[in-house]
């Protein structure tokens, strides 16, 4: 996977406790549906808490893995690896 670190728009829903669940990503005016969230890991990067979602989606007829990061302090999403 290649590191991209690109800001993206993510359609997500939150539990009552504030846990995000990503559903779709908007990247380059295209929407990508997240088929499955494989794992969620929390990390601290330079003191910022982040959630890393390892996801799978069908891209061009092929199931591919990618990672998106959610920065908890600023509520920003990043396409991290693809």
Image: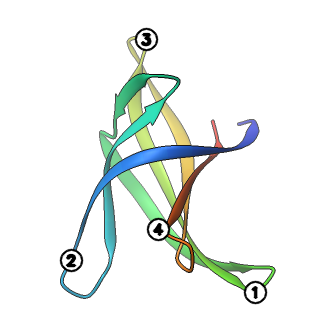
**Where in the figure is residue 75, as x and y percent of width and height?**
49, 69
**Where in the figure is residue 39, as x and y percent of width and height?**
45, 62
Report which residue position mark 1 lands on: 47
- In-image side of 33 versus 72 (left or right): left
Closer to the camera: disc 4 or disc 2? Answer: 2
By what rule are the colours in the image chosen?
rainbow
Circle 3 packing at 10 Å, graded few (<14), some (14-19), many (20+), is few
Report which residue position mark 3 lands on: 60
* Label pair 1/2, CB-CB below 8 angstroms: no
Report which residue position mark 2 lands on: 15
Closer to the camera: disc 1 or disc 4? Answer: 1
Instruction: Give the distance between the C-alpha atoms of the residues marked 4 and 2, in whole angstroms.
Output: 15 Å
Q: Earlier in the sequence, mark 3 or mark 1?
A: 1
Q: Earlier in the sequence, mark 1 or mark 2?
A: 2
Circle 4 packing at 10 Å, graded few (<14), some (14-19), many (20+), is some
* Label pair 1/4, CB-CB below 8 angstroms: no
Q: Earlier in the sequence, mark 3 or mark 2?
A: 2
* Label pair 4/2, CB-CB below 8 angstroms: no
């Amino acid at each position: 996977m290649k590191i991209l670190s690109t800001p993206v728009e993510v359609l997500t829903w939150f539990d009552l406790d504030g846990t995000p669940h990503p559903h779709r990503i908007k990247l380059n005016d295209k929407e990508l549906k997240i088929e499955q969230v494989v794992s969620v890991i929390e990390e601290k990067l330079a003191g910022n808490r982040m959630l890393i979602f390892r996801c799978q989606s069908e891209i061009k007829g092929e199931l591919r893995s990618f990672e998106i990061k959610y920065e908890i302090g600023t509520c920003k999403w990043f396409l991290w690896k693809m």
